[in-house]
Amino acid sequence: MAVPLFNTSAPLAAIDAEIRAKVAAILDAGVYVLGPEVRAFESEFAAYTGTDHAIGVANGTDALVLALRALGVGPGDEVIVPSFTFYASAEAIPHTGARPVFCDVDPDTMCITPETVKAVMTENTKAVIAVHLFGNVAPVDEIEALGVPVLEDAAQAAGTILEDGRRPGALGTIATWSFYPSKNLGAFGDGGAVTTNDDILAETIRTLRFHGSRDKQTFEMVGHNSRLDELQAGILRVQLPHLDGWADGRRAGARHYEEAGLGELVTLPKAAAGAKPAWHLYVVRSERADELRTALNDAGIGARAYYRTPAHLQPAMAEWGAGLDLPGTAEVARTNLAVPISPVLSRAEADEVVAAAR
Ligand SMILES: *Cc1c(COP(=O)(O)O)cnc(C)c1O
């Protein structure tokens, strides 16, 4: 039995008719940009995340750039970011004129820690980007206690919840989301959002996403054209009520792996203290990761490594990243391997993965 790395089609099949009806209704209405679907999605997503404001934007990378700009990040500033993340987390920083300062991760959670942040903080640190990597949760409260605003990159953490009921997106000063199709909440194209409880930051994001104008007449800032469109917002609205069920399915998939004995063969990912991750990717560690990937792929099982070359070693980051010593990053970059996870991963599939790995 083949087991794919992701399975987004099975969960969506159950709501296919509803999605098609929504698309047809939007075509009938003929409003495609910043209309009623975007407004409704923004209020529903704010309620879901437990924030006062959600602002739809074009994608998760723009969300990061706009959020950094709203925080006042600019030339002369430093922004701390993990190197072990999708490249976009770091790429957003030079777009503001600021300098990315790479910090290490805890190999067990694959997220940053107060210690790794503190090790690189300076008087020029303007913000910290805390990436909730693979759906796990970075310790935002402890990092904000260091006295610096935290931007949560929650692109991979839709559906994750804390034991105290709070969700990613509501933990720091501002948070960014991606609705790229493979994410836990995926549009049928690009999409993104910013969430925050801060009225002024929210107003600034709304202005920045429309060319720096509030009224389409006066342009107060050099802004961006970065909007979530009506079709994507409508499709996301149909999916949002299912997100928690899908997240439960991802957590059940992780339990299947534990019960099937995957932890005897590789190091399993560790949920951060107090977190119930909606594993976007289920990423194990092994000294024999490449050999294991080949064996799994040969057995028809999706498996691949992520971020083997971490952000600080990418050519475009050479000015800021060359020569840094980030031992946790080096370890996870070398040993990680994502194995199949989805809202519908069954115990039989987990058994199959474990048998092939064995
Ligand atoms: C996907 C992702 C992004 C970028 O989102 P896009 O919508 O593809 O621009 C940023 N950060 C992380 C951690 C991501 O996984």
Image (cartoon, rainbow, N blue to C red):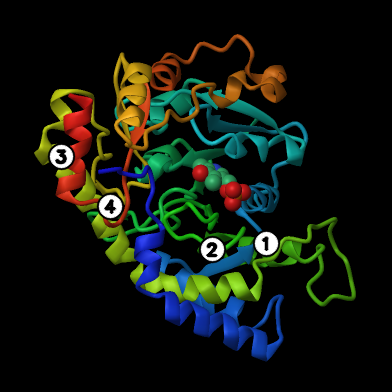
Q: Name the residue under label 1.
A: 205
Q: Residue at x 62, y 58 (%)?
A: 190
Q: How far apart are marks 3 and 4 (CA)?
A: 16 Å
Q: Kindly report which numbered mark, 4 or 1, lies closer to the viewer in this rendering.
A: 4
Neighbour tally class for label 4: few under 14, some 14-19, many 20 plus, Cα within 10 Å? many
Q: In this view, does 202 lie above or below 60?
A: below
Helix, strand or loop at disc 4?
helix
Residue identifier under label 4: 250
Q: Nearer the viewer, residue 181 or 10?
A: 10
In the image, residue 158 sits, relative to residue 28, either above or below, namely above
For the N terminus, give its image quadrant.
Answer: top left
- The answer to whether residue 48 is above or below residue 26 is above
Give the tally of numbered discs: 4
Q: Give residue 217's quadrant in the image.
A: bottom right
Q: On the image, numbered disc 2 is attached to which residue?
A: 187
Q: In this view, does 35 lie to the left or right of 152?
A: right
First in residue order: circle 4 vs circle 2: 2
N-term mark: 1 or 3: 1
Q: Earlier in the sequence, mark 3 or mark 2?
A: 2
Tell me, yes or no, whether the two marked residues, 1 and 3, touch with CB atoms within 8 Å: no
Q: Residues within 10 Å of mark 3 (few under 14, many from 20)?
A: some
**Structural distance between the alpha carbons of marks 3 and 2:** 31 Å
**Mark 4 CB in 8 Å range of ligand 1?**
no
Of the residues shown, which amino acid type is indicated by label 4? Answer: Arg
Mark before the other along the chain sequence, 4 or 1: 1
Q: Do the residues labelled 1 and 2 touch (CB within 8 Å)?
A: no
Which residue carries the number 3 mark? 351
Q: Where is residue 222 in the image (x, y as percent from the top left)?
A: 85, 55
Q: Which residue is drawn at 71% across and 86% down?
A: 30
